[in-house]
């Protein structure tokens, strides 16, 4: 008795479909791991090797795999740190 059910997950011949256009996927996005075809992904340099990320992830946060978030964090954290340092300096100056 062979079941007629076909699992879409990694079965033989069951190629993954692009999440954007439904074409046969070329590979998973390096960020969200959604299958994307060659037309719906962009290549990005994430250090030593080239990654493919989907256009949605590309639009969301730059082409660098990790640099995007560190840029955001540093842009938020640096002014806060500078402000804290200025406040601490003022407090130290006024206390003398
Ligand atoms: Zn596609
Ligand atoms: Zn993605």
Image: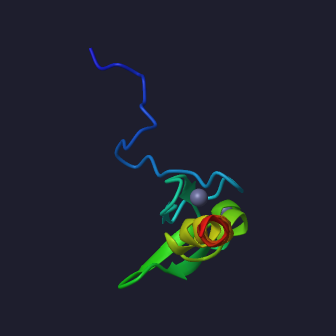
- Residue 24 seen anywhere in this rendered image of the structure: no
Q: Is 72 left or right of 4, judged from the image as shown?
A: right
Q: Farthest residue toward the top?
A: 1
- Quarter-of-image position of residue 83: bottom right
Query: Which residue is drawn at the image coordinates 45% and 78% (left, top)?
Result: 46
Query: Which residue is drawn at the image coordinates 40% and 83% (left, top)?
Result: 47
Q: Quadrant of the N terminus?
A: top left
Q: Is 13 left or right of 32, judged from the image as shown?
A: left
Q: Is residue 10 above or below residue 29?
A: above
**Foreground residue among 39 and 48:** 48
Q: Is residue 9 above or below residue 33?
A: above
Q: Quadrant of the C terminus?
A: bottom right
Query: Which residue is drawn at the image coordinates 54% and 52% (left, top)?
Result: 34
What is the number of callouts on the image?
0
Measuring from the top left, give residue 80's x and y in whole percent.
Answer: 66, 64
**Foreground residue among 63 and 50:** 63
Measuring from the top left, give residue 14's x and y in whole percent.
Answer: 44, 46
**Quadrant of the image where one finds ligand 1:** bottom right
**Foreground residue among 34 and 94:** 94
- Residue 51 seen anywhere in this rendered image of the structure: yes
Q: Farthest residue toward the left?
A: 1
Measuring from the top left, give residue 91's x and y in whole percent.
Answer: 64, 64
Query: Which residue is drawn at the image coordinates 64% and 58% (left, top)?
Result: 23
Which color scheme is applied? Answer: rainbow
Measuring from the top left, give residue 38's x and y in whole percent.
Answer: 59, 72
């Amino acid at each position: 008795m062979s079941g007629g059910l076909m699992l879409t997950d990694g079965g033989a011949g069951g190629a993954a479909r692009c999440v954007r256009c439904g074409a046969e996927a070329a590979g998973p996005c390096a960020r969200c791991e959604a299958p994307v075809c060659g037309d719906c992904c962009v290549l990005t340099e994430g250090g030593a090797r080239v990654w493919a990320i989907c256009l949605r992830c590309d639009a969301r946060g730059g082409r660098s795999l990790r640099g995007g978030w560190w840029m955001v964090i540093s842009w938020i954290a640096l002014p806060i740190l500078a402000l804290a340092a200025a406040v601490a300096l003022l407090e130290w100056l006024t206390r003398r």
